[in-house]
Amino acid sequence: MISTRDRIHEIIFEADTPAGKRFDVILLWGIVASVVTVMAESVPEWHESYRRVFTVLEWFFTVLFTLEYVFRLWAVRRPLQYATSFFGMVDLLAILPTFLGLVLPGTGSLRIIRILRLLRVFRVFKLAGFIQEAKGLQSALRASRRRIIVFLSVVMALVTILGTLMYLIEDSQSGFSSIPKSIYWAIVTVTTVGYGDIAPHTVLGQIIASIMMIIGYAIIAVPTGMIGMQMMRKPDGAVAEVSTQACPSCGRDGHDEDAEHCKHCGHRL
């Protein structure tokens, strides 16, 4: 006979069963409604007119998600492992801002982080292949991290030197009133953002700014090429299909289709 815990686990974590899929679809709609509520509440006219409605809705969603989080921890045999996983942290962050708002007013808008919970849609609608692609992107970023760190270090040194140089060339009336502010201008210029709040007025300053704008295009292209090169490298052998089954012990998914044990905690699937 299936225990109550296993039954709850099947409903909350599994997307292949009718009850599990029905629960996940309802949950996704609840997440969407919660995010829309947070965005609507930020409109001043609506906030003043429907303050009580927004308060009731917010606490309704918070209590709902809190109960869901508690049941998720109870349904797995290793709740700490699930709590420290990516989705476990997202689930916790989805309910914390409301309680935090009781102590620190103005932090309620952080509830928008709940939109991350919509990533479960890949599992609910059996789009597990997208999980594999996400892992490929993660691997490419990890393989390129040393090159990117070196590259960013060079860029930071460059904007620091050029920003300081502009501080010496331009005067405070042009906006270059300090070295940090000049470095801020250099970063904005090199990244080709160009807010226009600070601009050089001398000929030499404009020449340096023009050179930095040209350098900016290379700065954008280099990390893109690094990551793209890693993504183009195909792993040896065929890529294993990803299952949507969640581990009954730690609650994590993303296992290979033919896996018999969880790759995170070793529990039998």
Image (cartoon, rainbow, N blue to C red):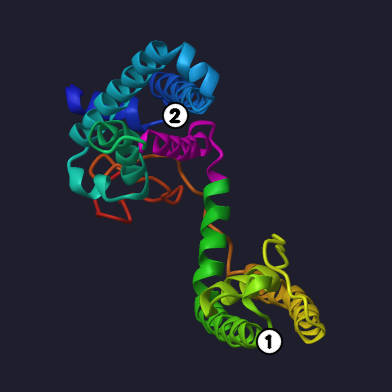
Does 261 sit above or below residue 169? Answer: above
Q: Is residue 8 visible in the rendered structure shown here?
A: yes
Question: Residue beneath label 2, please?
Answer: 16
Q: Is residue 116 left or right of residue 163?
A: left
Q: Are marks 1 and 2 in contact (CB under 8 Å)?
A: no
Label 1: which secondary element: helix
Secondary structure mostly seen in magenta is: helix
Q: Residue at x 20, y 23 (%)?
A: 2
Q: Is residue 233 visible in the rendered structure shown here?
A: no
The amino acid type of the residue labelled 1 equals Ile
Q: Give the percent coordinates (x, y) of residue 197.
A: 67, 61
Can residue 124 be found in the magenta stretch?
yes
Q: Residue at x 45, y 27 (%)?
A: 31
Q: Give the percent coordinates (x, y) of residue 46.
A: 52, 17
Q: Is residue 57 left or right of residue 231?
A: left
Q: Residue at x 38, y 51 (%)?
A: 259
Quarter of the rendering containing residue 103: top left
The amino acid type of the residue labelled 2 equals Asp
Q: Is residue 66 left or right of residue 38?
A: left
Residue 169 bears which disc, if any?
A: 1
Work out whether residue 267 or residue 178 is closer to the camera in this orientation and state it: 178
Q: Give the crowd class for mark 2: few <14, some 14-19, many >=20 residues within 10 Å.
A: some
Which region is colored magenta?
A: 107-129
Can residue 30 be found in the magenta stretch?
no
Does 166 sit above or below residue 67? Answer: below
Residue 61 bears which disc, if any?
A: none
Report the quarter where the C terminus lies: top left
Q: Give the percent coordinates (x, y) of residue 223.
A: 64, 73
Work out whether residue 195 or residue 241 is closer to the camera in this orientation and state it: 195
